[in-house]
Image (spheres, helix red, strand yellow):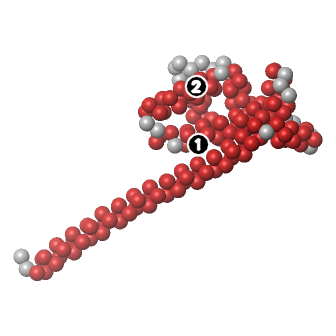
Amino acid sequence: MNWEEVGAIGQLLGSVAVFITLGYLALQVRHARMETRRSASSVRVSMTSQQMMAFAVDERLARVFTQAVIGFGSPLPPFMSELVRVTGVTTEEAASLLFAFNAQFQSFAHSIEFIGELSSEERREFEGNLQGMFTAPLFRSYFNNQRPMLNQHAVRYIEKLLTQPGSTPA
């Protein structure tokens, strides 16, 4: 073997090493992009949930919201209307519950977005909790009434989950 052959083999091995390195870097960039997306999504969900929970736990904010909706002549959100009609709670109480449920649904939708990253045991527990909650009459009413305003990917996931054996919608 002469030096030209050795050099050609060296160039070939160098090229293979470059392609392997580029492939590894591409995987790292993809992973970093996914982590950034997940982080941004988590921050968005956290901030939105905190804002909704502020309305849910502060009677004054719920009262102001309700007065503003009614004052501007807007109809109450469907879930609030049904809740007031069926249970007799005040519009402020209905607003608080709506905001609390919206915050909780945001959390569910975020978990559904990354459902593939849960262990099988975590997923089974999460899906069991969803089935239990969304087959109960109160959550089912929320889900049915607010459906057009909810994350549609999460809505489809929950609907599919509720059609599985062992799940009986109320």
Residue 74 visible in the snapshot: no
Q: Residue at x 70, y 37 (%)?
A: 102
Classify mark 2: residues with Cα within 10 Å, few (<14), some (14-19) or many (20+).
many
Q: Residue at x 78, y 34 (%)?
A: 96
Please give the residue where the numbered disc 1 appears in the rendered image.
110
Please give the residue where the numbered disc 2 appears in the rendered image.
131
Badge 2 marks a residue whose secondary structure is helix
Are circles 1 and 2 on residues that touch, CB within 8 Å? no
Between residues 11 and 75, which one lies in front from this camera angle?
Answer: 75
Q: Is residue 144 left or right of residue 7?
A: right
- The percent coordinates of residue 36 (x first, y second) are 53, 56
Task: Check the image and report above or below for 95 versus 10.
Answer: above
Residue type at the position of mark 1: His
Q: Is residue 9 left or right of residue 77?
A: left
Badge 1 marks a residue whose secondary structure is helix
Residue 7 visible in the snapshot: yes
The single residue placed furthest to the bottom in the displayed view is: 3
Residue type at the position of mark 2: Gln
Between residues 64 and 70, which one lies in front from this camera angle?
Answer: 64
Q: Which mark is residue 170?
A: none
- The percent coordinates of residue 55 (x first, y second) are 77, 41
- The percent coordinates of residue 135 (x first, y second) are 63, 22
Q: CA distance from mark 1 to mark 2?
A: 17 Å
